[in-house]
Amino acid sequence: MPKSTVGLFEDSRVVGDVVREIEALGFPRNEVRTLDEPAMFDVTGVMSFGRLEFEVDSLRELTRIGATEAEAEAYLDGLRHGGVLVFATGSDQMVDAAADIMRLRGAVEIEETSGPEPHLPTVVHESMIPIHEGSILAGRFSQPDSGACVFVW
């Protein structure tokens, strides 16, 4: 089951260092990436709305990995204000280590602006006791004032 961590950085100058530190943990280059709002949006046709397409794609990607709609909107708002997202996907230990790096490097806490964790049937959340052996652990995991969220999907 894939596990990802996402950190929002207001200071884009630290992002290169964050990525290098995460890659030094042994992450493959294609499992660590950044996302920032483009300075200009490509127009791909008469009915193309570059900004809207960027925002919809970004929201879709964030919710696909387990962010609530409120969290995804908060991350997107951070991008609108010049922030940069850093994503790292991998094993439990590697993702936890990447989240620690993000926290130490100043990832912004977005928990305050987010809603409750979504209710997913047949999914055991961090605070629940598994009912049967076939349950899956999925959802969002972060600690207050941590700055980086970890998503299992």
Image (spheres, helix red, strand yellow):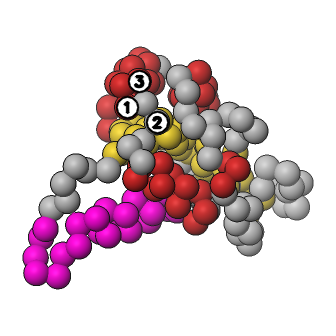
Amino acid type of disc 2? Glu
> Taking 87 as reference, is 16 above or below it?
above
Q: Is residue 22 visible?
A: yes
The part of the chain drawn in magenta is 43-65
**Residue 89 spot, x, y in % from top left:** 47, 40
104 relative position to 23: left or right:
right
Q: Which residue is mark 1?
A: 12
Q: Give the residue at x 41% y 24%.
A: 14
* Disc sitting over residue 14 in the figure: 3
| Badge 1: residue crowd in 10 Å (few <14, some 14–19, many ≥20) | some
User: Which amino acid, mark 1?
Assistant: Ser
Q: Nearer the viewer, mark 3 or mark 2?
A: 2
Given residues 70 and 64, the one toward you in this image is: 70
Q: CA distance from mark 3 to mark 2?
A: 9 Å
The residue lying toward the viewer, choosing from 88 and 72, is 72
State the mark number for residue 10.
Answer: 2
SS assignment at label 3: helix
Instruction: Tell whether 104 sits left or right of 140.
Output: left
Q: CA distance from mark 2 to mark 1?
A: 6 Å
Which residue sits at x=44%, y=65%? 60
Q: Mark 1 to mark 3: distance in Å?
A: 5 Å
Q: Position of residue 95 (x, y in %)?
A: 56, 33
**Secondary element at tag 2:** loop
The numbered dot on residue 40 is: none
Is residue 28 visible in the rendered image? The answer is no
Tags 1 and 3 in contact by the CB under 8 Å rule? yes
